[in-house]
Amino acid sequence: MKNVKRDAKMMLVVDIGNTNINFGLFRGKKLESRFIIPAQDYSRNELKERAGGIKIDNAVVCSVVPKATAAVAGDLRILSGKRPLVIGEDLIVPVKNLYRTPELVGQDRLVNAYAGIILYGTPLIVVDFGTAVTFDVVSKKGEYLGGMILPGLRISLDALVCKTALLPDIQLGKPREFIGRDTRNSMLSGLVYGFAALTDDLAGRIKRDIGAGARVVVTGGDAAFLSAYCDTAIALDKDLTLKGLYLLGSRPL
């Protein structure tokens, strides 16, 4: 943060998730810096400490946690003197939404679809490995078709531990071997290779519907970890959502 010029034109983009709140500071088209505040640790003082001293010219917020939206937006207004733009309220993602009930699509999913269209083209599959795993599908015409929602890796691991009597409480990590020879590695192998196989299979099935040339882009907190185990050709873009928020915030109102 200290290397950012104080007089630079800055856009702060905020992606509020269930587990983490991700912040990105853009100067021009460049993502100058990023930081994460765990959702449970968020406070105005924490935000001020992490982003303090930087003149924010405008801010864009996307959220899947309604209670947190007002708090973060209010704090940004106090810290910057300007009201941030909220996706879905002040900014509408300009993607044709073919969801059966369009208003029920998470705004983060639409932001990812929009960023993917701009940066990677269509047809497109965006896989976000966050608290939940989401597959979002975009047609060759740039239409948002829908997708899939699954429990994320950490939720799945927690459920496995909490709902069984004898399995140990372990941390997510790399399995030592494909065929686990102890309980810990059996759990990790099943989880990691299982999700990788799921990703490969669903991507293949979706491609049969929208076109074999569809690009697969992965993002989210566990994307870099899990993508290494997938056989599908994947573009890894950990900042896809932040980039999408910047692109939306840069559009003329």
Image: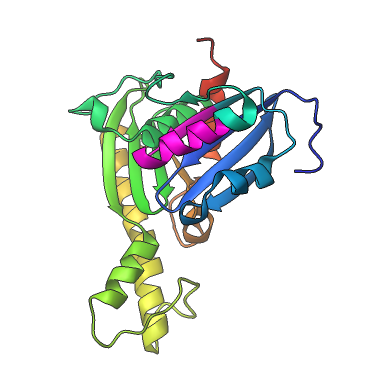
* Residue extending furthest toward the left: 100
Rendered view: 250 above or below 195? above
Residue drawn at point x = 55 percent, y = 51 percent:
37
For the rendered model, the colour scheme is rainbow
Q: Nearer the viewer, residue 85 or 243?
A: 85
Assign the N terminus to one quadrant of the image. Answer: top right
- Total tally of numbered discs in the picture: 0
71 drawn magenta: yes
Residue drawn at point x = 51 percent, y = 60 percent:
225
Residues shaded magenta = 60-76
| Residue 145 placement, left or right of 238 | left
Residue drawn at point x = 50 percent, y = 73 percent:
174
Q: Position of residue 171 (x, y in %)?
A: 46, 74
Residue drawn at point x = 46 percent, y = 80 percent:
177
Which quadrant would residue 25 be assigned to in this image?
Answer: top right
69 drawn magenta: yes
Q: Main secondary structure of the magenta part?
A: helix
Which quadrant would residue 183 be assigned to in this image?
Answer: bottom left
Can residue 211 be seen here? The reply is no
Q: Position of residue 81 (x, y in %)?
A: 62, 24
Rendered view: 92 above or below 105? above
Q: Nearer the viewer, residue 67 or 8?
A: 67
